């Protein structure tokens, strides 16, 4: 009797076929990236709306892995208006970090690649498409124009260099004014002071392990903001911190954003933080956006069953419940996505038509969009508002 193959089993032949395919695709894309002296016209583009700083347009970022292609981001479209904060929420593994890393061109290469779509960034007098930008040019923009606050400061800071040297280096690397060593040091101290570190001279000479978690996160923020970037990506910047420090860091980010007039793309799975920080919210599920709108719309009238579930699963002060709500089931396998709505198997609000193709986006208001069959023909579900 033949034994049943376990789920996800790959024969040696399948495995070889996948590797061959991956090599072919990634080699071609890598070659494209690494070209030198690419004319600017290749990645020059136009913003749809000049009031936006970033526009993601049908972005597809895939990982070509040994077990098949992981469609980590599969057709994501949203924008970050200038001077605003956009919150990106969704459960672990839904593609939030991959979306932000695509904007920095920091996907783990060669297996991670942007395969389709545009990421337009507004440079003031012109706009660039990050998806087509060669590595050479990207290095100029990264840090200077777009910068990122990483999730874990201990892994992002170098343990063998002093804090001051690490911040100095960032300033030196992006320096266009030919600053002297002394001026760079002054600027570093000013940055450390701006993020609320009291003993700046002392911290300048310290190593990362001599600081507390909150101070390290502040140093990370100082590094990210050292060159006054137009776009700050904050990937769960406060997850590792306790609530009082978290509140301080959020305040700090908000104030700094207004001071240097930049936009923030804020990634978190903490809905409380989103409510406090964001102007707009994008809800992702399994590599796609299921709902987006202003923060009021999403919190007061969540439309997608996934967002409704998220809202129901957050604790509310003063409301007594026996057990917090949890969305049943789990995310589909990213290598093998179904061809119907990705949330259908976990959804408790299915209507007729849900077994059809993946639902397209429906406008509930000019700013509020949802991808769900319940809103086709303007029909709105009961639990909405
Ligand atoms: N280097 C990689 N190689 C292969 N797959 C990857 C890689 N990095 C991410 N992925 C896959 O891409 C998908 C999206 O991952 P991502 O890191 O964007 O999740 P996330 O939404 O940021 O989750 P979290 O909230 O846990 O940070 C996941 O399915 C993950 O397994
Ligand atoms: Mg992440």
Image (cartoon, rainbow, N blue to C red):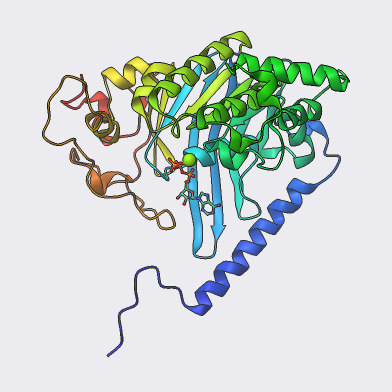
What residue appears at the point 21 percent right and 25 percent down from the top-left corner?
A: 380
218 or 209: which is nearer to us?
Answer: 209
Left or right, residue 163 beside residue 355? right
Q: Residue furthest bottom?
A: 1
- Residue 148 position within the rendered picture, expressed as x and y whole percent measured from the top left: 60, 31
The part of the image, by quadrant, that contains residue 383 is top left
- Residue 210 position within the rendered picture, expressed as x and y whole percent measured from the top left: 60, 34
Whether residue 385 is visible: yes
Say above or below: 14 vs 37. Answer: below
Left or right, residue 198 beside residue 370? right
182 or 74: which is nearer to us?
Answer: 182
Query: Where the C terminus falls, by quadrant?
Result: top left
What residue appears at the point 64 percent right and 15 percent down from the top-left corner?
A: 193
- Residue 46 position within the rendered picture, expressed as x and y whole percent measured from the top left: 67, 23
Left or right, residue 50 beside residue 346? right
Query: Where the N terminus falls, by quadrant?
Result: bottom left
Say above or below: 294 vs 42. Answer: above
- Residue 117 position within the rendered picture, expressed as x and y whole percent measured from the top left: 58, 38
Say above or below: 274 vs 1. Answer: above
Say above or below: 233 vs 189. Answer: below
Whether residue 102 is visible: no
**Total label count?**
0
Left or right, residue 214 beside residue 93? right
What residue appears at the point 51 percent right and 39 percent down from the top-left corner?
A: 97
334 or 234: which is nearer to us?
Answer: 234
């Amino acid at each position: 009797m033949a034994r049943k193959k376990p789920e996800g089993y790959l024969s040696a032949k399948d495995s070889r076929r996948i590797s061959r395919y991956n090599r072919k695709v990634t080699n071609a894309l890598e070659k494209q990236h690494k070209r030198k002296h690419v004319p600017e016209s290749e990645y020059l583009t136009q913003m749809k709306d000049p009031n936006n700083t970033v526009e993601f347009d049908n972005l597809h970022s895939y990982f070509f892995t040994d077990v098949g292609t992981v469609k980590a981001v599969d057709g994501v479209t949203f924008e970050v208006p200038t001077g605003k904060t956009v919150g990106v929420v969704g459960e672990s593994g839904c593609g939030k970090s991959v979306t932000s890393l695509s904007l920095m061109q920091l996907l783990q290469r060669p297996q991670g690649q942007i395969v389709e779509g545009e990421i337009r960034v507004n440079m003031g007098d012109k706009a660039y498409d990050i998806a087509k930008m060669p590595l050479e040019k990207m290095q100029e923009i990264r840090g200077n124009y777009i910068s990122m606050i990483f999730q874990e400061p201990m892994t992002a800071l170098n343990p063998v260099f002093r804090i001051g040297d690490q911040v100095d280096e960032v300033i030196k690397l992006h320096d266009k004014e030919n600053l002297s060593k002394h001026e760079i040091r002054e600027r570093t101290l000013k940055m450390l002071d701006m993020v609320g570190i009291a003993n700046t001279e002392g911290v300048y000479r310290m190593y990362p392990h001599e600081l507390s978690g909150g101070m390290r996160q502040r140093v990370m923020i100082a590094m990210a903001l050292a060159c006054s970037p137009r776009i700050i990506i904050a990937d769960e910047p406060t997850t590792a911190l306790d609530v009082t420090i978290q509140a301080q860091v959020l305040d700090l980010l908000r104030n700094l954003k207004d001071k240097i007039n930049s936009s923030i793309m804020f990634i978190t799975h903490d809905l409380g933080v989103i409510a406090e920080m964001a102007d707009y919210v994008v809800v992702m599920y399994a590599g796609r956006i299921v709902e987006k709108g202003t923060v009021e719309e999403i919190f007061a009238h969540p439309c997608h069953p996934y967002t409704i579930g998220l809202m129901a699963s957050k604790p509310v002060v003063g409301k007594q419940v026996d057990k917090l709500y949890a969305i049943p089931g789990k995310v589909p396998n990213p290598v093998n996505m179904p061809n119907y709505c990705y949330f259908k198997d976990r959804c408790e609000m299915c209507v007729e038509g849900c077994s059809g193709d993946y639902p397209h986006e429906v406008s509930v208001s000019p700013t509020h969009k949802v991808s769900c069959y319940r809103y086709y023909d303007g029909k709105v579900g009961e639990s909405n508002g």
